[in-house]
Amino acid sequence: MSLKQQQITLIQTSFNKVEPISVKAAEIFYDTLFSYDPTLKSLFKGDMKQQGRKLMAMLSAAVKGLNDLESLFPVLHELAQRHEGYGVKKSHFTPVGNALLHTLKVGLGDDFTPEVRAAWVTLLHIVADTMKSKMAA
């Protein structure tokens, strides 16, 4: 699975619109994630505002690097191994992806078009499949 240039542009443009509200977006993301699966809250030990900043910084770096997707794979592999150490399981990717899509929908409003959603879904599948390939459970 790969991204077409049009999808990369849609992802980058839409993320640029969400980035100015990154603190609120992270809050929406985690509130949504924990409403989808309350058991995931136990995986987070630290300050959630700091966690939100890390999430948005990671997303920003990934989105900016989409023109060289291959270079993101080693980063995603390392991220998978780190997250597995925190107790993350392959089954957690679905609520995480759904929470991110919901966050984008709220943050973008009418700009969250079917085409933008489809581009993000493709990216989320690439990220999840890449990370899950390095995880045991």
Image (spheres, rainbow, N blue to C red):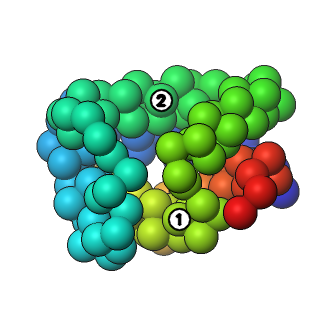
- Residue 12 location, x and y as percent? 50, 37
SS class, disc 2 = helix
Q: Which residue is mark 1?
A: 92
- Residue 97 location, x and y as percent? 49, 62
- Identify the amino acid type marked 2: Met
Quadrant hosting residue 30? bottom left
Vertical position of residue 25 compared to residue 70: above or below: below
Quadrant hosting residue 8? top right
- Identify the amino acid type marked 1: His
Query: How many numbered dots are placed on residues in this image?
Result: 2
- Residue 131 location, x and y as percent? 71, 48
Answer with mark 1 or mark 2, whichever residue precedes in sequence.
Answer: 2
Residue reaching furthest to the bottom = 36
Q: Residues within 10 Å of mark 2 (few under 14, many from 20)?
A: few
Q: Is residue 94 left or right of residue 55?
A: right
Q: Is residue 71 left or right of residue 53?
A: right
Residue at point 41%, 44% (across, down): 14
- Residue 6 location, x and y as percent? 66, 47
Q: Which residue is mark 2?
A: 58
